[in-house]
Image: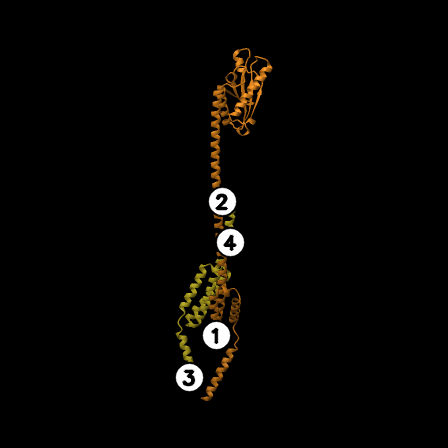
Chain colours: A yellow, B orange
Amino acid sequence: MNTQSISVLPALLLVGCAATFPPPTQHLADAESAQRSARELGAANQPTAQLHLKLADEQMVLARKEMANGDNRSADFVLGRAKADSELALALARELNASVDVTRAVDTSNATATTNAAQGAVK
Amino acid sequence: MRTFRTCSALALFTTLAACATTSAPSELVSARSAYDRAQNGATARLDPADLLTAKETLDRAEKSLTDNGDAQETKDIAYTAERRVEIAESRARTLVETQQKDTVTAQMNASQTATVRSTSAALGRANQQLAAQGQELQNAEQRRADAEKRAAQATADLERIGSVKQEARGMVITLSGSVLFASAQWELLPEAQVKLGDVAKALTERDPDSKMVVEGHTDSQGTPSFNLDLSQKRADAVRTYLVSRGIAGDRITAQGFGLARPIADNGSAEGRANNRRVEIVVQPSATAK
Protein backbone atom coordinates (compact mmCIF):
# COMPACT_ATOMS: atom_id res chain seq x y z
CA MET A 1 0.00 0.00 0.00
CA ASN A 2 1.59 3.22 -1.05
CA THR A 3 1.28 6.69 0.49
CA GLN A 4 -1.36 7.86 -1.96
CA SER A 5 -3.69 5.01 -1.33
CA ILE A 6 -3.48 5.56 2.46
CA SER A 7 -4.47 9.20 2.18
CA VAL A 8 -7.34 8.60 -0.28
CA LEU A 9 -8.98 5.79 1.74
CA PRO A 10 -10.57 7.94 4.53
CA ALA A 11 -11.96 10.31 1.92
CA LEU A 12 -13.55 7.44 0.05
CA LEU A 13 -14.99 6.07 3.30
CA LEU A 14 -16.54 9.43 4.16
CA VAL A 15 -18.10 9.78 0.71
CA GLY A 16 -19.42 6.23 1.02
CA CYS A 17 -20.97 6.95 4.41
CA ALA A 18 -22.62 10.15 3.21
CA ALA A 19 -24.00 8.42 0.21
CA THR A 20 -25.41 5.52 2.23
CA PHE A 21 -27.01 7.54 5.09
CA PRO A 22 -30.68 6.67 4.66
CA PRO A 23 -33.31 9.42 4.39
CA PRO A 24 -34.57 10.09 7.98
CA THR A 25 -38.20 9.58 7.05
CA GLN A 26 -39.05 7.95 10.37
CA HIS A 27 -37.61 10.88 12.32
CA LEU A 28 -39.54 13.26 10.06
CA ALA A 29 -42.74 11.32 10.77
CA ASP A 30 -41.98 11.37 14.53
CA ALA A 31 -41.47 15.13 14.50
CA GLU A 32 -44.68 15.66 12.51
CA SER A 33 -46.61 13.41 14.87
CA ALA A 34 -45.35 15.28 17.96
CA GLN A 35 -46.24 18.57 16.32
CA ARG A 36 -49.78 17.36 15.52
CA SER A 37 -50.32 16.19 19.08
CA ALA A 38 -49.13 19.54 20.40
CA ARG A 39 -51.54 21.42 18.17
CA GLU A 40 -54.44 19.13 19.14
CA LEU A 41 -53.76 19.84 22.83
CA GLY A 42 -53.91 23.58 22.21
CA ALA A 43 -50.21 24.46 21.99
CA ALA A 44 -51.16 27.31 19.66
CA ASN A 45 -52.90 29.00 22.62
CA GLN A 46 -49.78 29.14 24.78
CA PRO A 47 -47.20 31.71 23.59
CA THR A 48 -44.09 29.71 24.49
CA ALA A 49 -45.51 26.50 23.05
CA GLN A 50 -46.51 28.41 19.93
CA LEU A 51 -42.92 29.65 19.53
CA HIS A 52 -41.56 26.12 19.69
CA LEU A 53 -44.13 24.93 17.14
CA LYS A 54 -42.92 27.68 14.81
CA LEU A 55 -39.29 26.68 15.35
CA ALA A 56 -40.19 23.06 14.63
CA ASP A 57 -41.95 24.16 11.43
CA GLU A 58 -38.87 26.02 10.22
CA GLN A 59 -36.58 23.12 11.08
CA MET A 60 -38.78 20.63 9.22
CA VAL A 61 -38.76 22.86 6.14
CA LEU A 62 -34.96 22.96 6.35
CA ALA A 63 -34.74 19.20 6.90
CA ARG A 64 -36.90 18.48 3.86
CA LYS A 65 -34.69 20.75 1.78
CA GLU A 66 -31.55 18.95 2.98
CA MET A 67 -33.13 15.57 2.29
CA ALA A 68 -33.98 16.73 -1.21
CA ASN A 69 -30.31 17.70 -1.65
CA GLY A 70 -29.23 14.26 -0.44
CA ASP A 71 -27.81 15.64 2.80
CA ASN A 72 -29.65 13.12 4.91
CA ARG A 73 -27.24 13.12 7.85
CA SER A 74 -27.55 16.86 8.37
CA ALA A 75 -31.35 16.58 7.91
CA ASP A 76 -31.40 13.94 10.64
CA PHE A 77 -29.79 16.31 13.15
CA VAL A 78 -32.16 19.11 12.19
CA LEU A 79 -35.10 16.74 12.63
CA GLY A 80 -33.78 15.95 16.12
CA ARG A 81 -34.16 19.65 16.91
CA ALA A 82 -37.63 19.75 15.30
CA LYS A 83 -38.80 16.74 17.28
CA ALA A 84 -37.47 18.19 20.53
CA ASP A 85 -39.21 21.52 19.87
CA SER A 86 -42.48 19.75 19.02
CA GLU A 87 -42.31 17.61 22.16
CA LEU A 88 -41.57 20.69 24.25
CA ALA A 89 -44.61 22.42 22.73
CA LEU A 90 -46.66 19.33 23.60
CA ALA A 91 -45.36 19.31 27.18
CA LEU A 92 -46.11 23.01 27.59
CA ALA A 93 -49.65 22.51 26.23
CA ARG A 94 -50.24 19.71 28.73
CA GLU A 95 -48.87 21.89 31.51
CA LEU A 96 -51.28 24.67 30.55
CA ASN A 97 -54.21 22.23 30.50
CA ALA A 98 -53.21 20.90 33.92
CA SER A 99 -53.10 24.44 35.25
CA VAL A 100 -56.57 25.12 33.85
CA ASP A 101 -57.79 21.88 35.47
CA VAL A 102 -56.51 23.03 38.87
CA THR A 103 -58.29 26.36 38.54
CA ARG A 104 -61.47 24.58 37.49
CA ALA A 105 -61.24 22.11 40.41
CA VAL A 106 -60.77 24.95 42.90
CA ASP A 107 -63.72 26.83 41.37
CA THR A 108 -65.89 23.70 41.49
CA SER A 109 -64.90 23.07 45.09
CA ASN A 110 -65.75 26.64 46.10
CA ALA A 111 -69.03 26.56 44.15
CA THR A 112 -70.00 23.27 45.78
CA ALA A 113 -69.28 24.65 49.24
CA THR A 114 -71.35 27.76 48.47
CA THR A 115 -74.24 25.69 47.10
CA ASN A 116 -74.16 23.40 50.13
CA ALA A 117 -74.26 26.37 52.48
CA ALA A 118 -77.09 28.01 50.51
CA GLN A 119 -79.14 24.81 50.56
CA GLY A 120 -78.70 24.37 54.29
CA ALA A 121 -76.44 21.36 54.18
CA VAL A 122 -75.07 20.33 57.57
CA LYS A 123 -71.28 20.30 57.93
CA MET B 1 8.52 6.93 5.19
CA ARG B 2 9.75 7.55 8.74
CA THR B 3 9.60 11.28 8.20
CA PHE B 4 6.03 10.98 6.85
CA ARG B 5 4.92 9.05 9.92
CA THR B 6 6.46 11.56 12.25
CA CYS B 7 4.75 14.39 10.41
CA SER B 8 1.43 12.59 10.47
CA ALA B 9 1.64 11.96 14.22
CA LEU B 10 2.54 15.58 14.77
CA ALA B 11 -0.34 16.77 12.64
CA LEU B 12 -2.75 14.46 14.52
CA PHE B 13 -1.51 15.65 17.89
CA THR B 14 -1.85 19.28 16.82
CA THR B 15 -5.40 18.66 15.60
CA LEU B 16 -6.41 16.92 18.86
CA ALA B 17 -4.89 19.70 20.89
CA ALA B 18 -6.81 22.23 18.85
CA CYS B 19 -10.07 20.27 19.41
CA ALA B 20 -9.50 20.03 23.13
CA THR B 21 -9.23 23.73 23.46
CA THR B 22 -12.16 24.51 21.15
CA SER B 23 -14.61 26.63 23.10
CA ALA B 24 -18.14 25.25 23.46
CA PRO B 25 -20.79 26.77 21.18
CA SER B 26 -23.50 28.92 22.80
CA GLU B 27 -26.06 26.09 22.37
CA LEU B 28 -23.92 23.79 24.52
CA VAL B 29 -23.25 26.45 27.14
CA SER B 30 -26.96 27.10 27.34
CA ALA B 31 -27.76 23.37 27.56
CA ARG B 32 -25.24 22.86 30.39
CA SER B 33 -26.75 25.76 32.29
CA ALA B 34 -30.30 24.43 31.77
CA TYR B 35 -29.28 20.99 32.96
CA ASP B 36 -27.59 22.36 36.11
CA ARG B 37 -30.75 24.37 36.87
CA ALA B 38 -33.00 21.33 36.51
CA GLN B 39 -30.61 19.02 38.35
CA ASN B 40 -30.57 21.36 41.35
CA GLY B 41 -34.33 22.02 41.26
CA ALA B 42 -37.52 20.06 41.82
CA THR B 43 -37.30 18.43 38.37
CA ALA B 44 -34.60 16.01 39.57
CA ARG B 45 -37.06 14.67 42.14
CA LEU B 46 -40.27 14.91 40.12
CA ASP B 47 -39.16 13.71 36.67
CA PRO B 48 -35.80 11.92 36.94
CA ALA B 49 -36.46 9.78 33.84
CA ASP B 50 -36.81 12.71 31.44
CA LEU B 51 -33.92 14.49 33.08
CA LEU B 52 -31.78 11.39 32.49
CA THR B 53 -32.71 11.48 28.80
CA ALA B 54 -31.65 15.14 28.77
CA LYS B 55 -28.34 14.22 30.45
CA GLU B 56 -27.66 11.51 27.87
CA THR B 57 -28.31 13.99 25.08
CA LEU B 58 -26.04 16.53 26.77
CA ASP B 59 -23.32 13.86 27.05
CA ARG B 60 -23.66 13.21 23.32
CA ALA B 61 -23.21 16.92 22.69
CA GLU B 62 -20.11 16.98 24.91
CA LYS B 63 -18.70 14.01 23.01
CA SER B 64 -19.47 15.68 19.71
CA LEU B 65 -17.60 18.76 20.92
CA THR B 66 -14.63 16.55 21.71
CA ASP B 67 -14.86 14.68 18.42
CA ASN B 68 -16.02 17.38 16.04
CA GLY B 69 -15.41 20.70 17.77
CA ASP B 70 -18.15 23.28 17.44
CA ALA B 71 -19.50 21.76 14.27
CA GLN B 72 -23.18 22.15 13.37
CA GLU B 73 -23.73 18.60 14.58
CA THR B 74 -22.54 19.58 18.08
CA LYS B 75 -24.80 22.63 18.05
CA ASP B 76 -27.79 20.54 16.93
CA ILE B 77 -27.32 17.96 19.66
CA ALA B 78 -26.77 20.66 22.31
CA TYR B 79 -29.91 22.45 21.16
CA THR B 80 -31.83 19.17 21.47
CA ALA B 81 -30.34 18.59 24.94
CA GLU B 82 -31.56 21.95 26.17
CA ARG B 83 -35.05 21.22 24.85
CA ARG B 84 -34.97 17.84 26.62
CA VAL B 85 -34.18 19.64 29.88
CA GLU B 86 -37.08 22.03 29.30
CA ILE B 87 -39.40 19.12 28.53
CA ALA B 88 -38.43 17.49 31.84
CA GLU B 89 -39.05 20.74 33.68
CA SER B 90 -42.44 21.24 32.04
CA ARG B 91 -43.48 17.67 32.83
CA ALA B 92 -42.39 18.14 36.44
CA ARG B 93 -44.54 21.27 36.72
CA THR B 94 -47.45 19.39 35.09
CA LEU B 95 -47.06 16.66 37.67
CA VAL B 96 -47.28 19.24 40.47
CA GLU B 97 -50.40 20.74 38.89
CA THR B 98 -51.99 17.31 38.51
CA GLN B 99 -51.23 16.43 42.11
CA GLN B 100 -52.68 19.74 43.22
CA LYS B 101 -55.86 19.11 41.21
CA ASP B 102 -56.14 15.58 42.65
CA THR B 103 -55.73 16.97 46.17
CA VAL B 104 -58.39 19.65 45.65
CA THR B 105 -60.76 17.09 44.11
CA ALA B 106 -60.14 14.57 46.89
CA GLN B 107 -60.71 17.21 49.56
CA MET B 108 -63.89 18.35 47.83
CA ASN B 109 -65.16 14.78 47.53
CA ALA B 110 -64.34 14.05 51.17
CA SER B 111 -66.05 17.25 52.26
CA GLN B 112 -69.04 16.48 50.05
CA THR B 113 -69.29 12.95 51.43
CA ALA B 114 -69.11 14.25 55.00
CA THR B 115 -71.70 16.92 54.23
CA VAL B 116 -74.05 14.42 52.62
CA ARG B 117 -73.63 12.10 55.59
CA SER B 118 -74.26 14.75 58.23
CA THR B 119 -77.11 16.33 56.26
CA SER B 120 -78.69 12.93 55.83
CA ALA B 121 -78.34 12.27 59.57
CA ALA B 122 -79.86 15.67 60.38
CA LEU B 123 -82.69 14.96 57.95
CA GLY B 124 -83.26 11.60 59.64
CA ARG B 125 -83.43 13.29 63.04
CA ALA B 126 -85.78 15.95 61.70
CA ASN B 127 -88.02 13.26 60.20
CA GLN B 128 -88.08 11.38 63.50
CA GLN B 129 -88.90 14.59 65.34
CA LEU B 130 -91.62 15.36 62.84
CA ALA B 131 -93.08 11.87 63.19
CA ALA B 132 -92.98 12.19 66.98
CA GLN B 133 -94.67 15.58 66.79
CA GLY B 134 -97.28 14.15 64.44
CA GLN B 135 -97.91 11.30 66.85
CA GLU B 136 -98.11 13.72 69.78
CA LEU B 137 -100.55 15.86 67.82
CA GLN B 138 -102.63 12.81 67.06
CA ASN B 139 -102.57 11.82 70.72
CA ALA B 140 -103.55 15.33 71.81
CA GLU B 141 -106.39 15.30 69.29
CA GLN B 142 -107.49 11.94 70.61
CA ARG B 143 -107.33 13.20 74.20
CA ARG B 144 -109.31 16.27 73.25
CA ALA B 145 -111.93 14.16 71.47
CA ASP B 146 -112.12 11.83 74.48
CA ALA B 147 -112.47 14.78 76.84
CA GLU B 148 -115.21 16.26 74.71
CA LYS B 149 -116.96 12.93 74.63
CA ARG B 150 -116.67 12.58 78.41
CA ALA B 151 -117.89 16.14 78.92
CA ALA B 152 -120.86 15.54 76.65
CA GLN B 153 -121.63 12.32 78.46
CA ALA B 154 -121.23 14.00 81.86
CA THR B 155 -123.52 16.85 80.84
CA ALA B 156 -126.09 14.36 79.61
CA ASP B 157 -125.80 12.49 82.92
CA LEU B 158 -126.23 15.71 84.88
CA GLU B 159 -129.26 16.68 82.81
CA ARG B 160 -130.90 13.41 83.79
CA ILE B 161 -130.33 14.22 87.48
CA GLY B 162 -131.24 17.90 87.54
CA SER B 163 -131.45 20.95 85.36
CA VAL B 164 -128.19 22.22 83.93
CA LYS B 165 -127.73 25.82 82.78
CA GLN B 166 -124.77 27.84 81.63
CA GLU B 167 -124.60 31.18 83.39
CA ALA B 168 -121.98 33.91 83.74
CA ARG B 169 -120.87 32.46 87.10
CA GLY B 170 -120.38 28.99 85.53
CA MET B 171 -122.41 25.86 84.92
CA VAL B 172 -125.30 25.68 87.38
CA ILE B 173 -126.72 22.28 88.30
CA THR B 174 -130.00 22.66 90.11
CA LEU B 175 -131.24 19.78 92.25
CA SER B 176 -134.70 19.88 93.74
CA GLY B 177 -134.73 20.10 97.53
CA SER B 178 -137.62 17.68 97.86
CA VAL B 179 -135.61 15.01 96.06
CA LEU B 180 -132.62 15.48 98.34
CA PHE B 181 -134.10 16.12 101.79
CA ALA B 182 -137.23 15.47 103.87
CA SER B 183 -139.10 18.59 104.92
CA ALA B 184 -137.12 20.78 107.34
CA GLN B 185 -134.31 18.16 107.43
CA TRP B 186 -130.73 18.30 106.22
CA GLU B 187 -129.86 14.63 106.05
CA LEU B 188 -129.66 13.30 102.52
CA LEU B 189 -132.32 10.82 101.49
CA PRO B 190 -130.98 7.43 100.28
CA GLU B 191 -132.23 8.12 96.77
CA ALA B 192 -130.53 11.53 96.88
CA GLN B 193 -127.24 9.88 97.73
CA VAL B 194 -127.48 7.79 94.56
CA LYS B 195 -128.17 10.91 92.48
CA LEU B 196 -125.35 12.86 94.13
CA GLY B 197 -123.01 9.92 93.50
CA ASP B 198 -123.83 10.24 89.82
CA VAL B 199 -123.27 14.01 90.02
CA ALA B 200 -119.87 13.52 91.66
CA LYS B 201 -118.87 11.03 88.97
CA ALA B 202 -120.02 13.31 86.15
CA LEU B 203 -118.28 16.35 87.64
CA THR B 204 -115.02 14.45 88.05
CA GLU B 205 -115.09 13.20 84.47
CA ARG B 206 -116.12 16.52 83.00
CA ASP B 207 -113.42 18.70 84.49
CA PRO B 208 -111.37 17.20 87.32
CA ASP B 209 -109.80 20.55 88.24
CA SER B 210 -112.91 22.73 88.34
CA LYS B 211 -113.93 24.64 91.49
CA MET B 212 -117.44 24.21 92.86
CA VAL B 213 -119.75 26.08 95.19
CA VAL B 214 -122.69 24.24 96.70
CA GLU B 215 -125.48 26.71 97.41
CA GLY B 216 -128.45 25.94 99.63
CA HIS B 217 -131.78 27.75 99.05
CA THR B 218 -135.20 27.55 100.77
CA ASP B 219 -138.72 28.85 100.21
CA SER B 220 -140.11 31.67 102.29
CA GLN B 221 -141.94 29.58 104.82
CA GLY B 222 -140.47 29.84 108.33
CA THR B 223 -138.18 32.49 109.75
CA PRO B 224 -135.30 33.80 107.73
CA SER B 225 -132.77 32.68 110.33
CA PHE B 226 -134.20 29.17 110.38
CA ASN B 227 -134.11 29.03 106.61
CA LEU B 228 -130.57 30.42 106.48
CA ASP B 229 -129.42 27.82 108.96
CA LEU B 230 -131.30 25.05 107.15
CA SER B 231 -129.88 26.06 103.75
CA GLN B 232 -126.31 26.14 105.15
CA LYS B 233 -126.73 22.70 106.72
CA ARG B 234 -128.14 21.28 103.49
CA ALA B 235 -125.29 22.82 101.45
CA ASP B 236 -122.79 21.38 103.91
CA ALA B 237 -124.45 17.95 103.70
CA VAL B 238 -124.19 17.94 99.92
CA ARG B 239 -120.54 19.11 100.03
CA THR B 240 -119.62 16.45 102.58
CA TYR B 241 -121.19 13.77 100.46
CA LEU B 242 -119.48 14.92 97.27
CA VAL B 243 -116.11 14.96 99.10
CA SER B 244 -116.82 11.46 100.34
CA ARG B 245 -117.31 10.43 96.72
CA GLY B 246 -113.87 11.55 95.61
CA ILE B 247 -114.09 15.27 94.91
CA ALA B 248 -111.16 17.06 96.57
CA GLY B 249 -112.21 19.12 99.58
CA ASP B 250 -110.30 22.18 98.47
CA ARG B 251 -112.24 22.28 95.19
CA ILE B 252 -115.61 22.62 96.79
CA THR B 253 -117.19 25.12 99.21
CA ALA B 254 -120.72 25.32 100.67
CA GLN B 255 -122.89 28.34 101.37
CA GLY B 256 -126.48 28.72 102.55
CA PHE B 257 -128.56 31.60 101.25
CA GLY B 258 -131.86 30.78 102.99
CA LEU B 259 -134.85 32.43 101.36
CA ALA B 260 -132.76 35.29 99.92
CA ARG B 261 -132.53 34.10 96.35
CA PRO B 262 -135.86 32.73 95.13
CA ILE B 263 -136.16 31.71 91.51
CA ALA B 264 -139.97 31.36 91.55
CA ASP B 265 -143.02 32.87 93.22
CA ASN B 266 -143.30 31.74 96.83
CA GLY B 267 -147.08 32.37 96.60
CA SER B 268 -147.77 29.04 94.94
CA ALA B 269 -146.93 25.53 95.97
CA GLU B 270 -145.11 24.92 92.69
CA GLY B 271 -143.08 28.11 93.09
CA ARG B 272 -142.06 27.21 96.64
CA ALA B 273 -141.09 23.73 95.48
CA ASN B 274 -138.82 25.29 92.87
CA ASN B 275 -137.27 27.62 95.43
CA ARG B 276 -136.37 24.69 97.72
CA ARG B 277 -133.25 23.65 95.95
CA VAL B 278 -129.55 23.06 96.01
CA GLU B 279 -127.42 24.57 93.26
CA ILE B 280 -123.96 23.36 92.41
CA VAL B 281 -122.07 26.11 90.57
CA VAL B 282 -119.13 24.70 88.62
CA GLN B 283 -116.39 27.16 87.69
CA PRO B 284 -114.34 25.53 84.96
CA SER B 285 -110.57 25.24 85.38
CA ALA B 286 -108.25 27.29 83.21
CA THR B 287 -107.36 24.26 81.07
CA ALA B 288 -110.99 23.38 80.40
CA LYS B 289 -111.99 26.88 79.27
Tell me which chain the residue with mark 1 is part of: B
Q: Residues within 10 Å of mark 4 (few under 14, many from 20)?
A: some
Tags 2 and 3 both on a single chain: no
Q: Looking at the picture, which amino acid does disc 3 mark? A: Ile
Nearer-N-terminus badge (2/1): 1
The dot on residue B122 is: 2
> Which residue is the site of mark 4?
A106
Identity of the residue drawn at 42% across and 65% down: A30
Tags 3 and 1 both on a single chain: no
Q: Residues within 10 Å of mark 1 (few under 14, many from 20)?
A: few
Dots 2, 4 in contact, CB < 8 A: no
> Which residue is the site of mark 3?
A6
Tags 1 and 4 both on a single chain: no
Establish if B131 lies above or below A86: above
The answer to which of A100 and A28 lies nearer the viewer is: A100
Identity of the residue drawn at 49% across and 56% down: B103
